[in-house]
Image (cartoon, grey):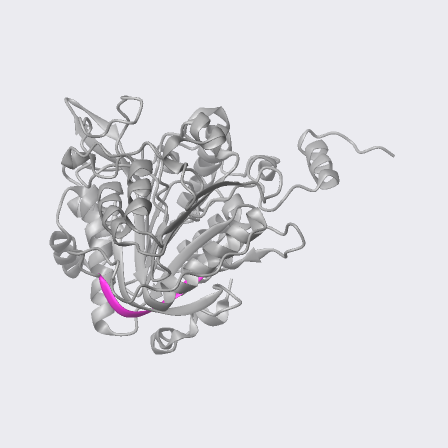
Amino acid sequence: MNTEMANASADERHSGTFLVPGVNCMAHARAERAAVLVDGATYFANLKTALRNARRSIFIVGWDFDARIRLTPQEGDRQSLGELLRQCVEEQPELHVHVLVWSVAIVHGPSAVVPNLFGAGWEEHPRIHFKLDSHHPLYASHHQKIVCIDGVLAFVGGIDLTVRRWDDRSHRARSDTRIDEDDEAYPPVHDVQMLVDGEAAATLCCLAHERWRSATGESLTPPRAASETDPWPVGLNPDLREVKVAISRSAPAYGGAGEVAECGRLTSDLIAAARNAIYIEAQYLSAPCVGEMLEKRLRQPNGPDIAIVMTYESRGLMERLAMGMSRDRLLRRLAKADRNRRLRVMYPVVPDGDGERQVMMHAKLMIIDDELLRIGSSNLNNRSIGLDTECDLTIEATDQTQRVQIATIRNGLVGEHLDVTAEDVAAMLGRVGRLATTIDRLNTNRRGLKAFPALTDGGPSTPIPGYWLIDPIRPFNLSRWLGSFVQALGLRGAR
């Protein structure tokens, strides 16, 4: 943890010294406009507009991909993503489409297997290029979610272009629109994506091109910007203007390239920097090192409030073991450290008849005070720190206008989960002065936040023995793996 940065004054942090290239990010890059797109309906609708505005290049890099999805089902639109991409290419004679998808997603992800493995009709065009990314160590995944348009616009966050990602901010328990491509209903899902332009977008497009080169061996020339058009979606008002965007990555040591651990360092620096409030939206929270950082802040007499909104139910045996059980043990440790009642760890629910239904949290977001906004693909588990390939964006406020806007984004997210407005959250926060108390006071509706049972159930709080075997922090070393396995079983080594 960077103690020197944690103790820096507000003026020093806001001067741009907090986000350090080569330490917790790869680069700073300017964006004239940045927008936070909350939930799949907002992201997909604006992505659809941007895709139609493309003239030179559409570059999609993802953990999973399903060309059957419809981007605007709320409008009754039946056109699939694949059909839209094909239409864009046919209408724009200079446009190329590149899609790069994690190879193991064909069996591990929710997308249809056959089209991604053997091809589909929409991609049968000389300027559409679809590849599977197998350039990763055993058990690792390519987890970035990036879409670049013409080298001047980039979407980054937690939302893959695959099935069961669309939902709107109402998160109704039942929805005729929230139907997957197999005509099956799926639960409410919450997620976040960021859109940037300018130098930040150009840097991200170079990053996507480099991933294509490493995965396929093919070097591509970055697209020449189309000066006659601006692909920014018409009608989308930026949340922030004239900001410096820090781009952070995680990547394992592999194929002669060294490890990149900027996202993990960023997490520790963000937690250390907080003075008043840490707000986190996460799918997973299981990395022991992240637990230690949060525990340290909770033990400090004047530490920040920590509010975490997370997925409760885990899917499948392995996820329950690797993420659910490990998360609960970590939460019990945090609860013991929470001497000043500053911790809130919750999952969102919406009314469902006389009962309730959980909302799946898929977002990967941190907001520190009113000053630092991070959105990306990194989960708070081990593998996102050093095994998987990740990409996160962080904006540090440099003036009061930007601080107000970051606070508004956070208040809107909190309000979404509590079924109140961002203004309601701001007003209560102004009265009580603490984020944790604000959540308590406003958490009175049927749509709201429920505390995780592990915070009070008295269960085990030590890490699962051999936890890193199921959630590794870096690529497997066979000899180390066998040694840890023997140790976890309590067996003696040979003499």
Is residue 7 at all visible to an observer of this figure? yes
Q: Is residue 92 magenta?
A: no
| Up-down relation of residue 109 to residue 430 (above or below) | above
Residue 344 at x, y percent in the picture: 31, 46
Question: What's the residue at 46%, 67% (across, down)?
Answer: 27
Question: Which residue of the protein is positioned furthest toward the right in this rendering?
Answer: 495
At x 49%, y 72%, the residue is 4
Taking 139 as reference, is 225 above or below it?
A: below
Inspect the magenta stretch and tell me whether residue 245 lies in it: yes
Q: In this view, does 247 lie to the left or right of 137?
A: left
Please tell me whether the stretch drawn in magenta is mainly helix, strand or loop. Answer: strand
The magenta segment is 239-247
Image check: 339 left or right of 136?
left
Residue 194's image quarter? Answer: bottom left
Which x, y percent locates residue 331? Answer: 42, 41
Q: Residue drawn at (40%, 37%), measured in percent from left and top?
A: 123
| Depth check, front residue: 35 or 485 | 35
Q: Is residue 167 left or right of residue 493?
A: left
Which of the pair 326/148 is nearer the observer?
148
